Amino acid sequence: MSVSNSSQKFLARNRAPRVQIEYDVEIYGSEKKIELPFVMGVLTDLSGKPVNELPPVADRKFLDIDIDNFDERMKAMQPRVAFSVPNTLSGEGHLMVDMTFESMDDFSPAAVAGKVDALKKLLEARTQLSNLQTYMDGKTGAESLVNQLLQDPALMKSLAAAPKQKADIDAK
């Protein structure tokens, strides 16, 4: 979507602003209404725990942030969080979480899980199981073979220890 066709620009052209500040002035005996533009500046530290030290507030510039450039500004700011959480996966110790966000998509559950090593492994396993389930759909004999494999630990160990095929190695 081009900047000239954005919904924000359309609204600015076709809908009156919600805040209108006007005052009456008498200039050379005639009254005139003067409208002041409404400009709002927000000072905030959205970087979280930055890797690089930020410049002093007096040296920073105001930035226009709108729907069209939000991800670009976010990537430039590189907001970061770093903290530890109780490890509920194994029940032992804490997990260190260190995430840097570059777009709004980075806040999705899958993207957050992909940035924490322990959760990333679980997400990959879940994806592989989902792919297996899709692959096995309609293959009646395959389901019984997988059940047989899961019931026989010796068979599972022998399959895990088997040398990998060249095609399997190339696929990775």
Image: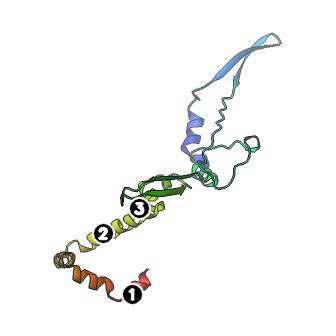
Q: x, y percentage for residue 93? A: 42, 57
The residue lying toward the viewer, choosing from 115 and 14, is 115
- In the image, what residue occupies the spot 66% across and 35% down? 41
Q: Quadrant of residue 162?
A: bottom left
Say above or below: 46 vs 18: below
Direction top: furthest residue? 29
The amino acid at mark 1 is Ala
Front disc: 1 or 3? 3
Report helix, strand or loop for mark 2.
Answer: helix
Asked if labels 2 and 3 touch by Cβ distance under 8 angstroms, the answer is no
Question: Which residue was labeled with disc 2?
Answer: 129
The C terminus lies in quadrant? bottom left
Q: Residues within 10 Å of mark 3 (few under 14, many from 20)?
A: some
Reading the chain from its start, which is encountered first: label 1 or label 3? 3
The residue lying toward the viewer, choosing from 166 and 161, is 161
Report helix, strand or loop for mark 1.
Answer: helix
Reading the chain from its start, which is encountered first: label 2 or label 1? 2
Report, in whole angstroms, how far the alpha carbon at label 3 lies from the one at label 2.
15 Å
Say above or below: 44 vs 160: above
Q: x, y percentage for residue 170? A: 43, 85
Decide if residue 127 is on the left or right side of residue 106.
Answer: left
Question: Which residue was labeled with disc 3?
Answer: 119
Colouring chosen for the image of the structure: rainbow
Q: Quadrant of residue 148?
A: bottom left
- In the image, what residue occupies the spot 41% across and 61% down? 119
The amino acid at mark 3 is Leu
Q: Quadrant of residue 118?
A: bottom left
The residue lying toward the viewer, choosing from 64 and 165, is 165
Reading the chain from its start, which is encountered first: label 3 or label 2? 3
The amino acid at mark 2 is Leu
Asked if labels 1 and 2 touch by Cβ distance under 8 angstroms, the answer is no
